[in-house]
Amino acid sequence: MPLCYTAAPTGTMASRAMLTLGLVFGINSVVNFANPMVVLAVRIAYGLVVALQYFAWKRVVDTVEAAQDRRPIWVKAKPAAGLGSMLSSMMGGGDAAGAGGAALAYNATTYYDLESDKAKAQMQQAMSGPIMMFVMSMFMGMHLPLAMQIVLTPLGLYDDVTVKRHLLAGTP
């Protein structure tokens, strides 16, 4: 019987929001971003974290390609993007559960297709996201997001189901 691929439990989202709030207040009260050496240290640490993230996703891509796991799996269908679908789901109609609370819509795929697509997209994001962060730091003087991502990026890697399955050798 095909398995259902699920994301992290919702309790993780609430704790992550509290962690982010704590980081904002903690970093702002402890770190002096007026000191150029502190800013340089934060930029270097962020660069190392970005490299860690890139190589972690590269390793996941390599292990997914090597495993070629073609077992069937069911994943939740992605809602159509756009304002109309967003408003429709907010008003209680047209969502995946249907008007009567019927079963959610699922798509059939394989572990390989799902994990390969996700890992490649995350690896690409690991290279495009930091560009914006460095622009914000260099030209806008916004250093707090860099400092926060030093903590949040490794936690995001740890929470990801695909990373847990392929790098941490655990079951998600």
Image (spheres, rainbow, N blue to C red):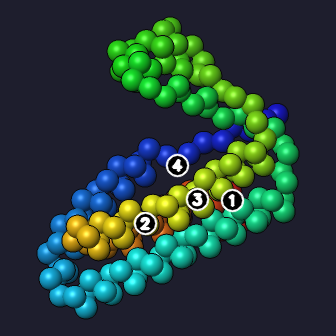
Q: Which numbered disc, 2 or 1, marks the residue closer to the eye?
A: 2
Based on the displayed image, in which of its 4 quarters is residue 162 positioned? bottom right
Residue, x 49% and y 73% (percent of image)?
50
Q: Are marks 2 and 1 in contact (CB under 8 Å)?
A: no
Mark found first going from the N terminus, 2 or 4: 4
Residue that label 3 marks: 124
Which numbered disc, 4 or 1, marks the residue that appears first in the sequence? 4
Horizontal side, residue 89 vs residue 25: left or right: right
Q: Which residue is found at the position 61% from the left and 29% from the top? A: 77
Query: Which residue, as the protein is rendered here, is positioned at the far front?
Result: 139
Q: CA distance from mark 3 to mark 2?
A: 12 Å
Q: Which residue is mark 1?
A: 165
Dot label at residue 8: 4
The residue at 49%/18% (across/down) is: 95
Q: Is residue 96 above or below residue 122?
A: above
Look at the numbered disc 4 and give the secondary structure of its residue.
Answer: loop
Residues under labels 2 and 1: Cα distance?
A: 28 Å
Q: Nearer the viewer, mark 1 or mark 3?
A: 3
Q: Position of residue 126 (x, y in %)?
A: 53, 63
Asked if 79 appears above or below 50 in the picture, the reply is above
Say which residue label 2 marks.
Answer: 131
Please give left or right for residue 34 compared with residue 103 in the image.
left
Residue 149 image point, x, y percent = 38, 68
- Front residue of 34/114: it is 34
Q: Secondary structure at mark 2?
A: helix
Q: Amino acid at mark 2?
A: Ile
Identify the secondary structure beneath mark 1: helix
